[in-house]
Image: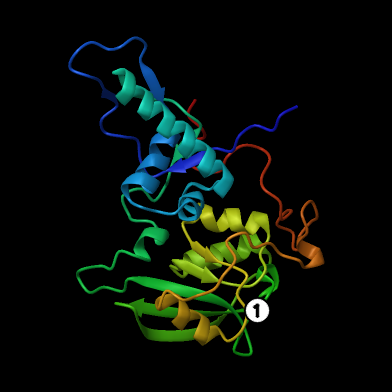
Amino acid sequence: MARPSRCRRVCGEPVHCRFGPREGDGGREVTLSVDEYEVLRLVDYLGRTHEQCAAQMGVSRTTVTEICERARRKVADCLVNGRGLRIAGGNYHVCGRAGQGCGWARLRDTDQKGEPSMKIAVTYENGQVFQHFGHTRQMKLYQVEDGKILREEVVDTTGSGHGALAGFLTAHGVDALICGGIGGGAQMALAQAGIRLYGGVRGDADQAVAALLAGRLSYDPDVHCDHHDHEEGHSCGHGDGGCGEDKHGCPGNGGCHG
């Protein structure tokens, strides 16, 4: 039995939902789903990478590529054959932070009022990037404005396991996380919170943040956790469920739209 597709998070439903040629309709109307529209908006209009789009929508990078290719073919069909385009339906839910600005966007869009533009967290131990997200006992938080670090502090985490840590990061207003290994469930929890992930990073925590701000950070977009407690299909051992992806539909507010 095929696994059902995961619900895709979108920032909002499109304002304009129908388009068509002035002369005739060339035949059938083409339907573009809302999640297909969102991928085109993020990738083709805003210039986000497939990886950034995947983190924003709470899906894999491969899924984004497949959606993008399918959506572009539909738009091309309308342009080449003079067909009408309707945007409707799809497997999606609207982000609960719509209208507030998501963390991944604030990483590149500096607030013009001079307010803090982002907060970066690093899994932390003795000055180094700690390598197991679900077991980190401390986070180092960096408040950044205009590409400069204004304030930094080391904070003890109030819980263990990826669920508690994702809540910890959200409560502290974190926009981006630098870490070592991290499981699939934790990655999804961060994506749902709109927190940008830079995984697979080793070495000095301060240097990693400096490299990120300079656009030179080396990280692994396909990072996974090698720790035995975080292998796919096994429990994290912290009472918050397994590290694998949720297999029972999508998280979010109000469920999927079909």
**Residue 38: which quarter of the image?**
top left
Secondary structure under badge 1?
loop
Return the x and y of residue 7 as percentages of the image width and height: 54, 37
Return the x and y of residue 176 as percentages of the image width and height: 47, 68
Mark 1 residue crowding within 10 angstroms, few (<14) / some (14–19) / many (20+): many
User: Is residue 83 in view from this perspective?
Assistant: no
Left or right: 245 with respect to 67?
A: right
Which residue occupies the foreground of this view, 193 or 187? 187
The residue shown at (67%, 48%) is: 245
The residue shown at (51%, 50%) is: 54
Image quarter (top left, top right, bottom left or bottom right) of the N terminus: top right
Which residue occupies the foreground of this view, 182 or 82? 82
From this view, report whether residue 237 is shown above or below residue 18: below
Q: Residue furthest bottom?
A: 126
User: Is residue 96 in view from this perspective?
Assistant: yes
Residue marked by disc 1: 130
Return the x and y of residue 195 as percentages of the image width and height: 48, 61
Which residue occupies the foreground of this view, 256 or 4? 4
Left or right: 226 with respect to 252?
A: right
**Residue 29: which quarter of the image?**
top left
From this view, report whether residue 165 is shown above or below residue 64: below
Q: How is the image coloured?
A: rainbow
Number of numbered discs visible in the structure rendering: 1
The residue shown at (79%, 51%) is: 233
Return the x and y of residue 22 as percentages of the image width and height: 17, 17
From this view, report whether residue 67 is shown above or below residue 111: above
Label 1 amino acid? Phe
From this view, report whether residue 88 is shown above or below residue 154: above
